[in-house]
Image (tube, rainbow, N blue to C red):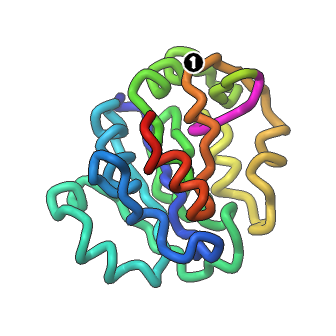
Amino acid sequence: MADTDVIILAAGNSTRFGMPKPFLKTISGLTFLEGLVNIYLEFGCRNIIPVLNQNHLETFSNTFPKLLRSKLKIVYNNKTELGRFYSLKLGADEVSNCDYCFIQNIDNPFTDLSTLQKLYENRKPDAYISPVYSDKGGHPVLIPQLIFNMIKKESNNNLNIKELLKQFNKITVSIENDKILANINTPEDYRVYIEQPA
């Protein structure tokens, strides 16, 4: 979609997991980051903006396909101690001339085309769109220009993303896929969601 970008938040230090989550492998053999980039390319996002940890530059350069790399607007966060909102701000600075933007966490590599399409179909210029499974909110979320412009201007790097979004109208979209709730933070999480059969 020409009016839609995506920010992929992938700059965490992965201290609980012990290795960088963007480069973990799915059952298909793709890395988390590669799989997400492919899905957002298929959806038609104009700009795909991964926010990566500066310390992962060498791993990214050595493992990520060059063809895909050329289709990204890569941002490196060299102040990861400032937290996730700072990464979101860095990504938001690269969003321009679009009406909507997905916020995608690397912790959830299971985003699919159907979910993205349902979120987009419910878009509103004054509300953010959240997928829901069994009354629980999941990922990704779709935010309008109104919100990402506010993120760009926000000077407080310690803000919690959820708290910021509470200031705006929310539209929930029911998704029949429990993997929108996934949050892979530990090796045990990885075994449950990746190594076991679907």
Quadrant of the rendering where the N terminus is positioned? top left
Q: Left or right of 92: which side holds 23?
A: left
Q: Which quadrant holds residue 15?
A: bottom right
Give the amino acid at mark 1.
Answer: Glu
What's the residue at 60%, 38% (across, down)?
139
Q: Nearer the viewer, residue 163 or 35?
A: 35
Give me the residue at 40% from left, 54% from top. 32
Above-or-below relation of 117 to 98: above
Q: Residue furthest left?
A: 67
Image point 39% across, 27% down: which residue? Answer: 113
Q: Would you say residue 19 is visible in this rendering?
A: yes
Q: Residue at x 48, y 64 (%)?
A: 21
Query: Which stretch did the figure color magenta?
Result: 135-142
- Position of residue 166 relative to residue 176, above or below, is below
Question: In this image, 84 relative to 70: left or right?
Answer: right
- Which residue does the numbered mark 1 point to in the structure image? 176
| Residue 64 at x, y percent in the picture | 25, 65
Q: Nearer the viewer, residue 3 or 107?
A: 107
Q: Is residue 138 magenta?
A: yes
Q: Is residue 137 magenta?
A: yes
Q: Is residue 119 left or right of residue 134?
A: left
Residue 137 position in % (x across, y down): 72, 32
In the image, residue 172 above or below residue 33: above
Split into 4 quadrants, where in the image is the C terminus? Answer: top left
For mark 1, does the 10 Å Cα neighbourhood hold few (<14), some (14 to 19), or many (20 or more) residues?
A: few
